[in-house]
Image (spheres, rainbow, N blue to C red):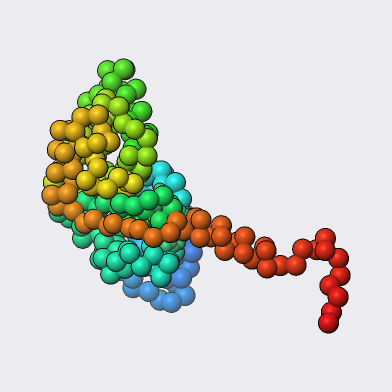
């Protein structure tokens, strides 16, 4: 068989096996192998590396699309000095993602603007990058989705969906009042993930006030029990980072000379 037709067959084998990245890289890899006098094993290793990287990248991109994170935040972007009530070493420990192994939950509790969503999303990003199926939803979206599913007779399907991800972020619990139907959906999602899959939840509700905020205090209590049983809780206080940035910007603007004032008379 001529070298040319051997090459063509090798290429079509790779394409048939759907190793498209390797097929694409074949001419370059053969060139390199010849130039650097690579052993057959070294050549095969280099060629399969190309496919492995392409597959890993596709998988990461698909996990990323699936997760629907609302922002590209990462833990490195979080300014811990601005938020001393957040235990930096605890966040770094969580970023190792060992908490996913025993389905530990993470709760970020605090007023608006203190970085709860940013921390939850940053952990979710770490989880995606480690290859875990991850999903972000606000509590209101979760409730709306469950409501629609109930109307359309897809309750079991939507429950299976929320049970699936290794890490489920439920953002903004308690921002909007939860009618009993919505609370029941949240309760069921949390119950079926209990000890099986981690929930990272953010809320403005202090733990003690859950009973008052939900229509059904019993369900609220049972939900909290499951969430807290194996959990890491951050009580974040302090100023809103948003307001702080806004204040800093206003200060900067104020300290600049207003150009309409005309030329300044130098002393
Ligand atoms: P919350 O969910 O507690 O209301 P967010 O996480 O949405 O607050 O944070 C509000 C805004 O402030 C976001 O743009 C976020 O990136 C930023 N932010 C909050 N805390 C910090 C921080 N410690 N370091 C950097 N950015 C922060
Ligand atoms: Mg938030």
Position of 198 compared to 144: left or right? left
Left or right: 5 with respect to 206?
Answer: right
Figure quadrant of residue 83? bottom left
Residue at 24 percent across and 40 percent down: it is 210
Tell which residue pokes out farthest to the front in this image: 267
- Between 111 and 31, which is closer to the camera in this rendering? 111
Q: Nearer the viewer, residue 130 or 117?
A: 117
Residue 162, percent from left and from top: 26, 36
User: Is residue 82 in view?
Assistant: yes
Q: Give residue 214's quadrant in the image.
A: top left
* Ligand 1 - quadrant of the structure image: bottom left
Query: Which residue is painted at 38% across and 51% down in the image?
Result: 111
**Residue plotted at (50% across, 55% down):** 242
Q: Quarter of the image for the N terminus: give it.
A: bottom left
The image position of residue 221, as x and y in percent, is 16, 39
Instruction: Estimate the x, y position of residue 149 in percent, counting from the top left.
Output: 31, 23
Rendering quarter of residue 194: top left
Q: Nearer the viewer, residue 133 or 222?
A: 222
Q: Is residue 208 left or right of residue 129?
A: left
Q: How many marks?
A: 0
Camera sees residue 56: no
Q: Quadrant of the C terminus?
A: bottom right
Q: Please determine whether, in this image, residue 201 is positioned above or below residue 80.
A: above
Residue 154 in the image: x percent, y percent? Answer: 27, 22
Image point 43% across, 77% down: which residue? Answer: 36
Of residues 230 and 70, the one nearer the viewer is 230
Up-down relation of residue 256 to residue 106 (above or below): below
């Amino acid at each position: 068989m001529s070298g040319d037709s051997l090459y063509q067959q090798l290429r079509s084998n790779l394409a048939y096996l759907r190793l498209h990245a390797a097929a694409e890289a074949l001419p370059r890899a053969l060139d390199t192998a010849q130039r650097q006098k690579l052993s057959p094993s070294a050549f095969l290793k280099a060629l399969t590396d190309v496919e492995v990287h392409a597959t890993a990248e596709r998988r990461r991109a698909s996990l990323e699309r699936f997760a629907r994170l609302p922002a590209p935040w990462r833990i490195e972007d979080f300014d811990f000095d601005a938020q001393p009530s957040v235990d930096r070493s605890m966040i770094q420990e969580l970023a190792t993602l060992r908490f996913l192994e025993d389905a530990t939950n993470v709760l970020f509790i605090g007023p608006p603007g203190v970085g709860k969503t940013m921390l939850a999303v940053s952990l979710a990003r770490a989880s995606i990058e480690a290859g875990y199926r991850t999903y972000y939803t606000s509590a209101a979206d979760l409730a709306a989705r469950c409501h629609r599913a109930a109307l359309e007779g897809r309750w079991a399907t939507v429950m299976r969906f929320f049970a699936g991800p290794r890490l489920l972020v439920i953002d903004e619990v308690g921002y909007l009042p939860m009618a009993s139907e919505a609370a029941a959906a949240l309760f069921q999602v949390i119950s079926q993930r209990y000890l099986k899959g981690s929930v990272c939840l953010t809320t403005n509700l202090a733990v003690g006030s859950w009973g008052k905020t939900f229509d059904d205090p019993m369900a609220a209590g049972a939900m909290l029990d499951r969430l807290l049983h194996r959990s890491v809780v951050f009580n974040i206080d302090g100023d809103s980072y948003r307001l702080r940035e806004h204040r800093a910007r206003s200060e900067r603007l104020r300290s600049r000379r207003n150009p309409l004032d005309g030329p300044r008379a130098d002393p």
